[in-house]
Image (cartoon, helix red, strand yellow):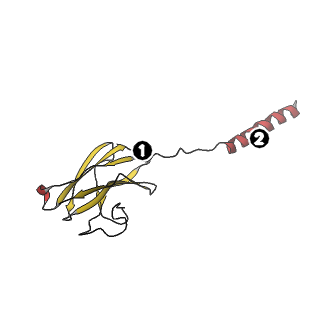
Amino acid sequence: MMKKHLSVSGLVCLSLFLFSYSCQDHQLPGEAPLLSTHDLFYDSGHGKCSFTTELEVLNIGTIPVTEYGIVYNAALGGGSGPNYDNPTIEDYPKIVFDMPFSTGIKTKVGPQICTNSNYYRAYAILNNGTVVYGQTLRFTNL
């Protein structure tokens, strides 16, 4: 009887040991937010060359966002610089939105920039360092 008790105890211990190493916490891949860039327009009520920007958060995703807004180029005259027609947050100025990141349309007055043409798009910086962009649009002030 003692031998049988040890065998059962040994099997239980071995089973627990193997079970503890077989369980892994699987992380589901995160879903990035989905952004839409809306048309911008000059807003003379806030200065000679002020413009109002607008973006829409279509889906907040599952990865937390640390910052979001509009990135734009502001080159005077002809286009120049890296990604001129597809601005990135590494190369061009940003308009950071301070409203909570939630679904819906967000609007913010931008700085005074007197240029003939601007490319711009919505962006969101995720807490893992990834940057998500909306589509690029072009504003022409002719």
Indicate the position of residue 129 as horizontal and vertical percent values. 44, 57
Q: Is residue 131 left or right of residue 70?
A: right
Identity of the residue drawn at 22% across and 59% down: 140
Quadrant hosting residue 89 = bottom left
**Residue linked to disc 2:** 14
Q: Say which of marks 1 and 2 sits in front.
A: 1
Secondary structure beneath label 2: helix
Secondary structure beneath label 1: loop
Identity of the residue drawn at 35% across and 43% down: 58
Q: Is residue 99 above or below residue 92?
A: above
* Identity, as a three-letter code, of the amino acid under mark 2: Leu
| Numbered tag placed on residue 37 in the rendering | none
Indicate the position of residue 67 as horizontal and vertical percent values. 35, 55
Frontmost residue, 139 versus 123: 139
Indicate the position of residue 88 as horizontal and vertical percent values. 36, 61
Res. 60 visible in picture: yes
Quadrant of the image containing the C terminus: bottom left
| Numbered tag placed on residue 61 in the rendering | 1
Quadrant hosting residue 109 = bottom left
Q: Looking at this view, name the residue that lies furthest to the top.
A: 1
